[in-house]
Image: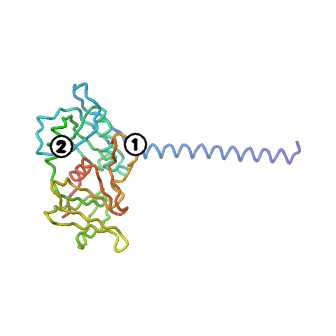
Amino acid sequence: MTLVRILTYRTNSVADSKRLTLKKLLIVLATLATVETHSQSVKVLYKSDIKNLSEGKKFAYIEPATDTNFLQYVATIQAKDKNKKSVLENLFAEIRKEANKLGATCYKINFFTRGSSTNEAILTLDCYFAYDATLATNTANHEINVVYIFGKEKEDDGRTISVDVNDSVQEIKAGTFLKYTLKEGEELKISKGGFTGATVWLKWEADKQPQFYTLTGFGLSDIQQQPYYPGQSSIGFNTGRINKITDISLGLLLVNLLKQCN
């Protein structure tokens, strides 16, 4: 092997070694970033001795008017994530998944905090089993013909979303929502984005269950990654600018954890 070839070989070897080292470093950094991004955890804090429950398929929000004597306590479950990364529906989804495995079919809000000393978002739910008759009674206890419109989820986001409701401009601060109650014969027009934007018309209907709409990406994450919602997803896409949250149990969670601004 000539001197030129030897020098070229050694140079290429050093370059290849540096590239390999750099590649390994990038892999390590990517792994650390993934760990940070997916730091969400779920934990069963307390669990009852109830046994032989089938896996739950529902996870209803328990209305205050519902008689709790007909509920069987299953577990208290907590989900938490870094506050910077977390969104409420992801915390809720993780708890629901674990609760359904244990046989729970409904829940009450136990605790929620965001941005504590550990800079985490923490959601804790008390989970129960209820027979279908009790769940039907609970559904009847929902407010009817009410519409909720959400902007940004986190109060410290600072951004305000504008929306036209019946041709009147309304401002939704981060961490808040608008609430409207439809009267018989009344219509509600929700518009966003001007002439080229989106419009939704809503009408009063007898015994119409609550309706929930989001004007941003809030509420739209991980839609296809929820196998524990058999045959349904949390979000029904509507227009791209105005999206309907079809899971009432999620919608009512958001209503109870965020603030009304009108």
Q: Secondary structure at mark 1?
A: loop
1 or 2: tag closer to the N-terminus: 1
Could you tell me the amino acid type at mark 2?
Ile
Q: Which mark is residue 84?
A: none
Between 102 and 56, the one nearer to me in the picture: 56
How far separated are the C-alphas under marks 1 and 2?
29 Å
Between 243 and 160, the one nearer to me in the picture: 243
Quadrant including the N terminus: top right
Quadrant including the C terminus: bottom left
**Residue found 22% across the figure and 71% down from its top:** 166
Could you tell me the amino acid type at mark 1?
Ser
Q: Residue furthest right?
A: 2
**Residue found 65% across the figure and 43% down from its top:** 20
**x, y percent for residue 25:** 58, 44
In-image side of 48 versus 92 (left or right): left
Q: Residues within 10 Å of mark 1 (few under 14, many from 20)?
A: few
**x, y percent for residue 82:** 36, 47
**x, y percent for residue 107:** 22, 40
**Residue found 40% across the figure and 42% down from its top:** 39
Q: Which mark is residue 39?
A: 1
Res 119 visible: no
Image: 158 above or below 221: below
**x, y percent for residue 106:** 22, 39
Place residue 218 in its image quadrant: bottom left
Q: Residues within 10 Å of mark 2 (few under 14, many from 20)?
A: many
Q: Secondary structure at mark 2?
A: loop
Place residue 137 in its image quadrant: top left
Nearer mark to the viewer, of 1 and 2: 2
Which residue is disc 2 drawn over? 62
Place residue 213 in its image quadrant: bottom left
